[in-house]
């Protein structure tokens, strides 16, 4: 009997084109992108071409793209380092967010004394934007708003343009987990004015264990790990070039 796979909100099958690119890379890209010899420089060129291509899809600069192991790491990197490099003291979010966000902010509340405000929801599960405006206008403390674009369980769609505008008007930073939407919606980070945007490739027929974090140019970000100077020193460790190309 044929197996019919329907759980695409959790993960999608890898497309044949992706498998072909990854297999070719495994066969030909032997070098470490950080090596200065010719084999390393070839791998580095492939890596940076992928970064450039990815950046162009969201109208970002290549330097604003940091490759990660996926959405969870990217969420952690954005939220945790915002409280260090950007001196954020309050986070506004919703209890319907992914655990990559909820567990991270719970840690920060307990260990870093970060103030957390949870937004009210409408009857359909969508975010009450009037409550967001009220919270932002009532307190001038440096704030990060963290809201996903498409909810992975309910499918509710955030008015990301409206939220980005509200955040700009109230001098708040805006982080959005767009892992469920980026493969299906056109997002322009410059038009949005968003500060952090998260992607995970396996949500739209790419490989598992690879993603990226968009960080708006000019923001001061601290790494979660320490080691080499890969990914502008923000995410050390030899890049997973085969999955990045996929």
Image (cartoon, grey):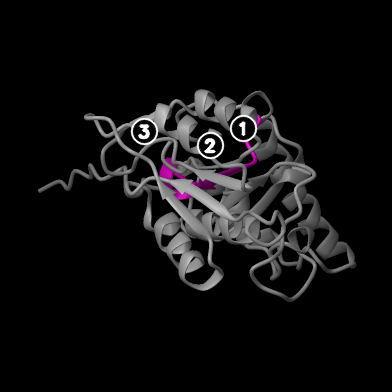
First reached walking from the N terminus: tag 2 or tag 3: 3
Q: Inspect the magenta stretch and tell me whether residue 146 lies in it.
A: no
Tag 1–tag 2 contact (CB < 8 Å): yes
Pointer 3: what residue? 127
Tell me the element at label 1: loop
First reached walking from the N terminus: tag 1 or tag 3: 3
First reached walking from the N terminus: tag 1 or tag 2: 2
Q: Residue 226: x, y in percent?
A: 71, 75
Q: Which mark is residue 136?
A: 2
Q: Nearer the viewer, residue 64 or 244?
A: 64
Position of residue 144 in the picture relative to residue 223 (left or right): left
Q: Residue 236: x, y in percent?
A: 71, 69
Task: State the residue lying farthest toward the bottom.
Answer: 227
Tag 2–tag 3 contact (CB < 8 Å): no
User: What is the span of residues highlighted in magenta in the rendered image?
Assistant: 193-206
Tell me the element at label 3: loop
Pointer 1: what residue? 170
Q: Residue 15: x, y in percent?
A: 44, 43
Q: Inspect the magenta stretch and tell me whether residue 199 lies in it.
A: yes
Question: Compared to 129, does 177 lie above or below?
Answer: below
């Amino acid at each position: 009997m044929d197996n019919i796979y329907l759980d695409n909100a959790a993960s999608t099958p890898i497309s044949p084109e992706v498998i072909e690119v990854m297999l070719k890379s495994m066969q030909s890209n032997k070098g470490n992108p950080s090596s200065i010899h010719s084999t390393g420089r070839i791998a580095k060129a492939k890596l940076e071409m992928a970064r450039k291509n990815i950046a162009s899809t969201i109208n970002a600069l290549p330097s604003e793209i940091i490759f990660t192991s996926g959405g969870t790491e990217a969420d952690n990197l954005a939220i945790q380092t915002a409280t260090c490099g950007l001196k954020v003291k309050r986070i506004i979010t919703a209890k319907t967010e992914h655990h990559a966000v909820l567990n991270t902010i719970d840690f920060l509340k307990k260990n870093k004394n970060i103030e957390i405000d949870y937004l009210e929801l409408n009857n359909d599960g969508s975010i009450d934007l009037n409550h967001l405006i009220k919270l932002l206008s009532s307190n001038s403390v440096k704030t990060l708003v963290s809201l996903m674009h498409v909810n992975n369980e309910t499918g509710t769609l955030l008015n990301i343009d409206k939220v980005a505008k509200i955040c700009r008007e109230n001098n708040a930073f805006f982080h959005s987990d767009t892992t469920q939407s980026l493969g299906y919606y056109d997002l322009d980070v410059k038009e949005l004015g968003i500060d952090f945007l998260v992607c995970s490739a396996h949500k739209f027929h790419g490989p598992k264990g690879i993603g990226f974090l968009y960080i708006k140019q000019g923001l001061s970000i601290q790494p979660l790990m320490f080691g080499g100077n890969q990914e502008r020193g923000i995410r050390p460790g030899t890049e997973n070039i085969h999955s990045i190309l996929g």
